[in-house]
Image (cartoon, grey):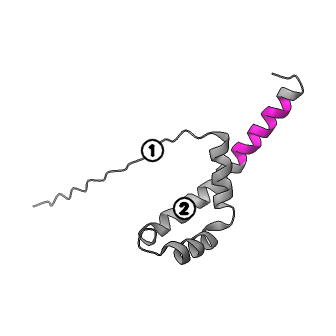
Amino acid sequence: MNKISIKAEVRITATVELTEGHLRALDALAGYGPDAFLRAFYVKLGTAYMKPFEKDLRELFTMIRNDVPLALDDVKKAREQLKGGVV
């Protein structure tokens, strides 16, 4: 007799719309890296809330540090083109 194994998975994602200011704040927040952030967070606020999500926070910081500077560079280029009269 064959055995059937069923595995259900649920994946939740969210899309967030950010302003340039939000992007700059994220860039600054992640700028020191996850180790420095977590060290300061744990000293000031404890580990109870963040510790279960430390792996996710590290992944988030990596995403921010990889993607946000590129987006901000695009903003800078767009501003330069607008100042130069190029649309």
Expressed as whole percent of the image width and height from the top left, the position of residue 87 reads: 80, 21
Residue beneath disc 2: 59
- Residue 73 among magenta residues: yes
- Closer to the chain start, of discs 1 and 2, is 1
Q: At x 43% / y 46%, what residue is drawn?
A: 13
Q: Residues within 10 Å of mark 1 (few under 14, many from 20)?
A: few
Q: Is residue 24 above or below residue 86?
A: below
- Do residues under tags 1 and 2 come within 8 Å of each other at their CB atoms? no
- Left or right: where 16 falls relative to 48: right
Residue beneath disc 1: 14
- Residue 11 among magenta residues: no
* Quadrant of the snapshot with the N terminus: bottom left
- The residue furthest front is 44
Q: Residues within 10 Å of mark 2 (few under 14, many from 20)?
A: few
* Amino acid at the residue labelled 2: Glu
Expressed as whole percent of the image width and height from the top left, the position of residue 41 reads: 55, 71
Expressed as whole percent of the image width and height from the top left, the position of residue 38 reads: 56, 72
* Amino acid at the residue labelled 1: Ala
For the stretch drawn in magenta, the main secondary structure is helix
Provide the residue span drawn in magenta: 70-81
Q: In the rendered image, which quarter is residue 61 located in? A: bottom right
